[in-house]
Amino acid sequence: MLIRITWRRAILTLLVLAAGALLFAWSGIFNIAASGGHWAITNWVLHGVMRNSVRTHSLLVEAPPPLDDIALKARGAGHYASGCAPCHGAPGEPQNPIIQRSTPHPPDFSESLDDWTPKELFRIVQHGVRYTGMPAWIVPERRDEVWAMVAFLEALRDMEPEEYRRLAYGAEAPRQPPGSSAGIGGLGTPPAEVLADCARCHNRDGQGRDGAAFPVIAGQNEAYLLQALRAFADGSRHSGIMQPPAARAGDEALRALAAHYAAQPRQPVPQSFDPALLAEGERIARQGMPENQVPACLSCHGAEALARNPSWPRLDGQHAPYLEGQLALWREGLRGGGPYHRIMQTVASRLTPEQAHAVSAWFASQGGGE
Ligand code: HEC
Ligand code: HEC
Ligand code: HEC
């Protein structure tokens, strides 16, 4: 017998199928338990879809910066230890068995990492993977931070546990995932475990490590430090790397941390610059550029102005790439901050990248010291 396919019959069949699917979903027969894992075929389909999606979307990713940069790798590693290792494991830190019971479970990078290209890794880390628990970067627009993570992942493939520990926890901090040990500081002293968390990246003395990986916070104005930390904690200053430690510290600890780091002596960081570049930078810092309505930077960032406005930052003895990076973030509309940060948005938007480069170099070359 031949059944003629008509529009009516086709639509009716679809409706019956849809009703069947709804009934199936409503009945609760479908087993959503993670314990059994996916069937091999489901795994194959899902992972295939994910691979293809990543490959296609990564075509639009810009060319990577030089990834063999110790500052990038250290910044990525510091965040990896608290933001990624709890799911993916790390060299010398096997994956948590609880995590292995999730479906799909995160690949164990203490064993291996597939041969994704840097652009593909960028895509995965920037946007995460839907339906899997793989989170997106907190601020996907911070492409500089996502590239730092990619630089670290590239190096992770053949990294020894020793090297990982140094890159992720610093030379001085004990190997200690954040929040893993209790410690109570005295009145006005930061709790030991919170300071240990900051020290992984900034050291206890606030000088940082691994070249320009982390800004110098030693000897910075206390009021500015507190304002910056609160801005990270409430997300009004955007950084996928700094927001989590500031948010998990809690406001009371932030006050103590600002006092602690403000009291550390500031050592100038060794950097060398071309004298012509410094001369150009000094001119902008001292005189500004009246023709472009750029005020003299020292009118706010000089010693006298800072004495009047303790919630404004000193810039001397800072890493030049950090200062330049912050100016670039303001130009892109990505740098928030305290109540006065919009002043800087205006100032930075009037500087060309070359001028920002020169003036950052000049401030960086200025002595540090008390
Ligand atoms: C809550 C757990 C979780 C956290 C935290 C997490 N991931 Fe993932 N990640 C996953 C899961 C689950 C997958 C598997 C996705 C899949 O199967 O398609 C994954 C996949 C990946 C992949 C693709 C690996 C592959 O070969 O398929 C990379 C790369 C990755 N994650 C990097 C990171 C980085 C870097 C971080 C930290 C910024 C991070 N992940 C944080 C759960 C997590
Ligand atoms: C995983 C590494 C890491 C950890 C942990 C970390 N920081 Fe940071 N910190 C950074 C990076 C990277 C930046 C630069 C952020 C940016 O580019 O937006 C930064 C920026 C800062 C700034 C802003 C400096 C300025 O001149 O505006 C302060 C203040 C700061 N951190 C303090 C802390 C404190 C206090 C802690 C502990 C609660 C901490 N950090 C934990 C990496 C880290
Ligand atoms: C009218 C006052 C004012 C002038 C002029 C000014 N700044 Fe600023 N600047 C600020 C304030 C306020 C902040 C703090 C913003 C925040 O994070 O809340 C700041 C922050 C900065 C930062 C970030 C520091 C850090 O540690 O993250 C840089 C870099 C900077 N200024 C560079 C410059 C340069 C270069 C010039 C001159 C071209 C300049 N500023 C002129 C007020 C000023």
Image (tube, rainbow, N blue to C red):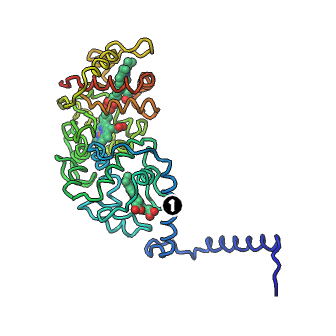
- Disc 1 on helix, strand or loop? helix
Left or right: 255 as drawn, with respect to 147: left
User: Residue at coordinates 22% horizontally, 32% vertically from top-left?
Assistant: 218
Ligand 2 picture quarter? top left
User: Residue at coordinates 28% horizontally, 20% vertically from top-left?
Assistant: 276
Q: Circle 1 sits on which residue? A: 52
**Residue 253 seen in the figure:** no
Left or right: 362 as drawn, with respect to 23: left
Residue 12, given in percent of the width and then of the height, sits at 78, 72
Residue 60, given in percent of the width and then of the height, sits at 50, 48
Cβ of mark 1 under 8 A from ligand 1:
no
Q: How many marks?
A: 1
| Depth order, front residue of 361/330 | 361
State the quadrant of the N terminus.
Answer: bottom right
| Depth order, front residue of 276/302 | 276
**Residue 165 seen in the figure:** yes
Q: Is residue 324 above or below residue 73?
A: above
Residue 259, given in percent of the width and then of the height, sits at 24, 32
Q: Is residue 270 above or below residue 169?
A: above
User: Residue at coordinates 41% horizontally, 67% vertically from top-left?
Assistant: 102
Residue 104, given in percent of the width and then of the height, sits at 44, 67
User: Residue at coordinates 34% horizontally, 46% vertically from top-left?
Assistant: 148
Among the 4 quarters of the image, the one containing residue 290: top left
| Depth order, front residue of 114/197 | 114
| Depth order, front residue of 69/316 | 69
State the quadrant of the C terminus.
Answer: top left
Q: Is residue 145 above or below residue 361?
A: below
Question: Mark 1 is on which residue type?
Answer: Asn
Rate crowding at label 1 as few (under 14), some (14 to 19) or many (20 or more) other CA atoms within 10 Å: few
